[in-house]
Image (cartoon, rainbow, N blue to C red):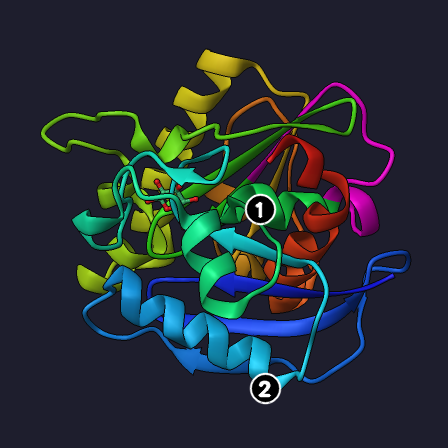
Amino acid sequence: MVVLGIDVGGSGMKGGLVDTITGEMITERFRIPTPPTRHPEEMAQVFKQIVDHFDYSGPVGCGFPTIIKHGVCLSPGNLNEEWEHLNVKELFSNACGLPVTVINDADAAGYAVMNFGIGKGKMGMVLMITIGTGLGSGAFWDGELIPNFEMGQIPYKKYKKIETWAAASAKERENLSFKKWGKRFNKFLEIVELLICPDLIILGGGTSDDFDAYKKYITIETPVIPAKLGNHAGIVGAAVAAVHEAPKN
Ligand code: BGC
């Protein structure tokens, strides 16, 4: 089945048509910058533009960068506060006139990795961590998604959430070396290991491509591996979620 997947981020909204059986993206990725206001109505219009670009009708899968419960945003993450308690599923469905399934973006990326990538067949507790503006996390037990693990939201020292201190955005903002940032990221992983005791941690997002530069600072006992799925994982996972998660959404 071919499904449109849309990965909504704080800086860009990206879509592509995905073969949900093979996990292949069968079109070029189409990206529109996220409106700087990050305002719901404006983002809904961009969502519609992406659907129109593909001249698509059918179910749409969407990865969204906040907690999402039954289509509703429960915390604004790095977006605009107006998103809180807003029904994202309804907003986007109404904007494009199609049924939309919305899940958390890290859950979507995890979906792709667990179905078509390095996580395939991995049992027990697998945690996908996406390293970007924030620290996203997607948890899987025996390959089944447990939605909305928000490990990046753990308070740490003076920070309301540890992602402010340990995400890729902190590395950029403070111009940290891989050594300095790698140690921070390792601290985050130590807390994750202590709290949920995963069997495997898979890293995604742009910074996971630089894994060789900081892997020596990762000292936790849990195996940590990069996803190596390219930057289409969010789109592919969103499309697959539209097939598997729609009844629960
Ligand atoms: C949000 C998560 C999201 C992550 C990556 C965090 O700020 O709380 O829900 O998955 O950013 O976008």
Between 196 and 31, the residue placed more toward the observer is: 31
Relative to 7, is 164 on the left or the right?
A: left
- Could you say where residue 55 lies in the image, as x and y percent from the top left? 67, 84
193 w.r.t. 95: above or below: above
Stretch of the chain drawn in magenta: 114-128
Which residue is pictured at 57% across the width and 46% down the height?
A: 203
| Residue 115 colored in magenta in the image | yes
Q: CA distance from mark 1 to mark 2?
A: 31 Å
- In terms of image quadrants, where is residue 36? bottom left
Picture coordinates of residue 211, whole percent (x, y): 55, 55
Q: Which residue is mark 2?
A: 53
The residue nearer to you, when weighing 138 against 192, is 138
Q: Residue 46: x and y, percent?
A: 41, 76
State the SS at label 2: helix
Task: Give the amino acid at mark 2.
Answer: His
Residue 235: image location, x then y, percent: 63, 63
Residue farthest to the left? 158
Measuring 25% from the left and 65% from the top, which residue is drawn there? 38
Residue 214 visible? The answer is yes
Q: Which tag, 1 or 2, sits closer to the chain's start?
A: 2
Residue on which disc 1 sits: 203
The quadrant in which the N terminus is found is bottom right
Q: Quadrant of the C terminus?
A: top right
